[in-house]
Amino acid sequence: MFDNEEFEETITQLDSVEAARVVRKGGRIVELHVLAAPSKSPKQVSRDIQSLAMARFGVNIDRRVISVVQLSSDSIKEPKTPRPKLLRIKESTDNSRASLTVTLGWETGEFVGSASGPEGPSARLRLVGEATLHAMESIFDATPPLALDAIGPASVGMRTALIAVIVFAGKNGEELVVGSALSHGDDDEAAVKAVLDALNRRLPAVSS
């Protein structure tokens, strides 16, 4: 059973969602309060939350328990902990070999990670994921070795989510963390966001 803090933090990784609060009784979600920017309709925000909950946690949330409050962007405070953000993805090819470069923005700098391998759709997502990890390692000097265990799409109803599984050396030995992101027609971008989602909740750990 997932804990509320993890679930709430995952929801805030969705576009436009700034904060979330879950109320459960007997293990069942009976209330889900969301603070969101007005960039999406409340109905779309609710649908995104339902899809993410099913893809990431296997939980089916009744839309009737989701309450969405929208404030103007100027009224929403910036999060206290800065998070790396995707700036761009570039690709170059040489014969049958592809190189992917991911650039992340964090605080006032840009950090680049690259990965190369066979050209082709089956290897592309892994290259994007590995390049993202290398960019994260360049941000945090004290980051323990990170490895991409798996990355790939998962169908949830009519939507597609990218799921990333990351391995790193934690306090209790090897640890696995999982991240997800809905794909809105761009699997490369969703792959980067899935890797960031897996590591965002661990930033204090990987950067210490």
Image (cartoon, helix red, strand yellow):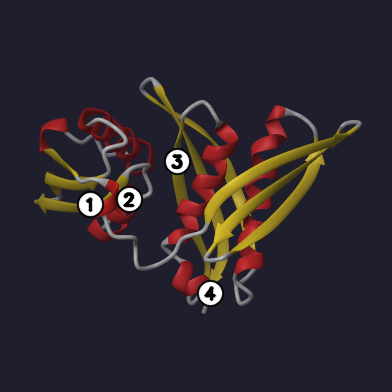
The label number, if any, that marks residue 91 in the structure image: none
Taking the image as drawn, is residue 7 in sight? yes
The residue to which callout 2 is attached is: 12
> Disc 4 and disc 3: Cα gap in Å?
23 Å
Three-letter amino acid code at disc 3?
Ala
Residue of label 1: 20
Q: Which residue is mark 4?
A: 207
- Residue at the image position 27 percent from the left and 60 percent from the top: 5
> Of residues 195 and 33, which is closer to you in this image?
33
Where residue 150 sits: x, y (%)? 59, 45
Badge 4 or badge 2: first in the primary sequence: 2
> How busy is the neighbourhood of tag 3: few (under 14 within 10 Å), some, or many (20 plus)?
many
Counting the numbered discs, the total is 4
What residue is disc 3 on?
Answer: 181
**Residue 177 makes an appearance in the image:** no
Dot 1: element? strand
